[in-house]
Every structure is written in C-alpha cells, then in structure tokens.
Image: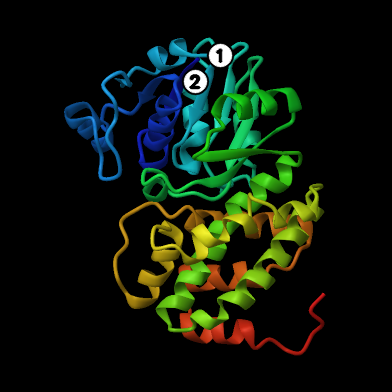
Amino acid sequence: MSVSVIGCGRWGTFLGWYANKIGHEVLIWGRESSCNMAKLIETRKNEYLQLNDDVVLTTSLEAAINFSDFIIISISSQQLRTMCQRLNELDLNGKTIILAMKGIEVDTGFRLSQVLLSEIKQHINVSIWVGPGHTQAFTEGIPNCMLISSTNIDISKKIVDEFSSELIRLYIGQDIIGNEIGAAAKNVIGIAAGMLDGLNFSSLKGALMARGSREVARLVRAMGGNELTVYGLSHIGDYEATLFSEFSHNRKFGEDFVKGVEFNKLAEGVSTVKALLLLAKKCYVDMPICNAIYSILYNNEDPKQVLNDLFLRPITFEF
C-alpha cells in the first residue's frame, strides 16, 4: 500500500518513517520554504530519525495527493483550514484522510475533522490518529498503544489493519467527538503540569490529572460525546507522555514559561486553551484549569498565585 504524509515536522516525518518501516510505499510532503523539508532533502534525516532512500520527498502538493489513496495530515492545527482549501482544488474523491494532529480551531471552536469537512467539498473518508507516543521513544523501539477514530467503523478497521504493528498497537475509538476534544485538551493539561514542575509543585500533578480529566469530561458530554471517552487512550491514556515526559513540548513549554525561558517549538496547548474556553462558554461548562492557564498565558497573571488558588478553591464536593 502507498501512503502520503502531508507535513514534515517531528510527528509527520516519524509517521512516514513508521509507514515505510512496516512495509508501505511512502511519500512525505513539505513546503518549499520549510527548513525541515530542506534538511530532509539534503540529508534524509532530522534530529530524531533517518529516512530510507525509498521514501519519496516532495514539495508538490499535487504529487502528494496523486501518490496514494491514504493521506495522513500532520501540521499545526491552526494551519489546517488553509491547507484544506488548497487540497480541495485537487482530486480527493474516494481518498481516506487521516488527521494525525491534536487541536481545536481557535476562531470557530471546530474540531479538526469539522474543519476538514467544512472545506473539502468532495467525497472523502475522514479519520483521526491520536493517543500517546513520542518519536524519540518509538525510534528506540519502545512500543505504545494509539487510537484510530472515525464516523465509519469500516474505515477505522481498515486503517488499524494497515498500520498496526508490534511497535504501535492501534485501537478503534467509537466516539470521535470525545476523542478529538480529549486529544486536544490534554495539551492544555500538559502545560499546567509543566508549570507545576517549574514551580516545584510536581506533587500536585496527581490532583491535576484527576481534576483535569473531570472538566474535560464535562465538556465532552455537553458537546454530545461520551464522557467516558476521556478516560481512554485519547486523553488520560496520553497523560504519561504529556504530563511527565521529557519529550513533551507542552509540558516543557509550561515549565520554561514559569522560569522565564524562551521555548521555540510548537506547543499546541497555547492556542487550544483559547478554543476550549470558547466551547466551554457555548456549552455552559466550568473549566477552572483551562481558565487558570489562560489567565497566566494571556492576562499575565502570576503563575504561582493562580495555580495555588486553583488547588485551594473553596470547599466543594469532588463529584
């Protein structure tokens, strides 16, 4: 089988590497202006992995779409709509698009599958690929479990059959709303965890996990999803990789932020917290952790005071 990957960042390049490793023909697309793509074309490697010679590299979006009927998109979530507008000019009919990214559109509060379907005016199959796992661990041969979810169970089964291996065990998710919201929201909880680490409050990360999953579950339920989905692979199952791992961009961003250290890599939770609060307002859901992170990032409130106040809220019932 052939696979096209749209995106040449850390995760997109890894998925191309992985698909090739398990026996698929692979093409990876990147923008002409992308430093990541320039380095891949010149050296066929990045700081995480080495690509085999048979992996095709291109800056032609048309070539990427024509290469395969399975198209994985792994780019910044806030760039997805613009990408979809470009893709809609090409022939996508009958193709399966897999969103291997986590986020919510800030301006609309749309889940990423909603962004895709609002722009692509052709018959396509849409799925998401989420869950725990870091490139650095996978390339060392350390396995993990991840999740495929779509509105079509047959498409989910097909993707799981084609991409499962001893390195990545794929499960089928039945609640795309809960899985998309949970996968995006865990990045915000990851920023909070990093801030706790930076303030030497790491012992509060257990409370953060318990309360964070509860507020995300309330939002998922209000949006029509299954609140139990939050306790699966897409959200709480990803906590180890996001709240504790040295490789987590969101956790490291939070830690560096409270220490006053510049962080120059993508931390999706920075934009996602805005979108979550937009959805919370629409759905009349209280999200105190998200409110706290927003106030720190965008209102310049003192992290130590805000987080201390958050965990010392007035007496209330746990459930």
Q: Name which residue type carries label 2.
A: Leu
Give the percent coordinates (x, y) of residue 49: 29, 39
Residue indicated by mark 2: 87
Label whose residue precedes the other's in the sequence (1 or 2): 2
Question: Badges 1 and 2: C-beta atoms under 8 Å apart?
Answer: yes
The crowd level at tag 1 (other Cα within 10 Å; few <14, some 14-19, many 20+) is many
Camera-side residue of 41 and 104: 41
Location of the C terminus (image quadrant): bottom right
- In the image, is residue 215 above or below residue 305? above
- In the image, is residue 286 above or below residue 138? below
- At 79% from the left and 79% from the top, the residue drawn is 318
Give the percent coordinates (x, y) of residue 312: 64, 88
Residue indicated by mark 1: 92
Look at the image and name its color scheme.
Answer: rainbow
Q: Quadrant of residue 153?
A: top right
Q: Secondary structure at mark 1?
A: loop
Q: Is residue 316 left or right of residue 107?
A: right
Most extreme residue toward the front, as rendered? Answer: 166
- In the image, is residue 251 above or below residue 198? above
- Say if residue 104 shows up in the picture: yes
